[in-house]
Image (cartoon, helix red, strand yellow):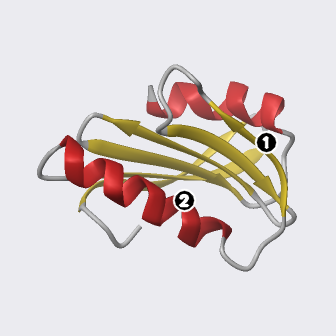
Amino acid sequence: MREGRLLKSEMVFIDGEQLYVEKVAFKDWHESIHAFYLISDKLAEGHTIVEQRWNYDDFCNITVRLEDYTYMLIRQVDVIALVRSFRPIPIDEFDNIAQPLIL
């Protein structure tokens, strides 16, 4: 992610899956909301969305499966966290793997 101040960037192996985890911080919640939608658009740009799920408790929580990979993007007030796979993984399976990495 090019937006925000980098807090964390690492490769993780869980259940045989290689995942990229990144967290970035922003000045305040307003900047993070704006950046959330920019980041989400950039991640999906040029790809076909196969499946997506929004968390309706907070519209700044989305998991998307593209034809090439799956990602979860969560805004936590003034921090945005990303978990991205290197292959397409069904959302239910991906959420179970990814959520413990960023919550």
Percent of width and height locating residue 5: 21, 61
Dot 1 amino acid type? Gly
Q: Is residue 38 left or right of residue 89?
A: left
Q: Quadrant of residue 78?
A: top left
Count of numbered tags: 2
Dot 2 amino acid type? Ser
Is residue 25 at least partly visible in the picture?
Answer: no
- Which residue is disc 1 drawn over? 16
Crowd band around label 2 with a 10 angstrom C-alpha radius: few (<14), some (14–19), many (20+)? many
For mark 1, give the secondary structure: loop
Query: Disc 2 to disc 1, how far (Cα)?
Result: 26 Å
Percent of width and height locating residue 80: 37, 46
* Residue found at the very far top of the displayed protein: 57
- Which residue is disc 2 drawn over? 40
Q: Is residue 5 left or right of residue 99?
A: left
Name the residue at 46% across, 57% down.
37
Question: In terms of sequence position, does the residue under pointer 2 or pointer 1 come before the other?
Answer: 1
Percent of width and height locating residue 85: 70, 54
Crowd band around label 1 with a 10 angstrom C-alpha radius: few (<14), some (14–19), many (20+)? few
Q: Is 85 situated above or below 101?
A: below
Name the residue at 79% across, 42% down.
16
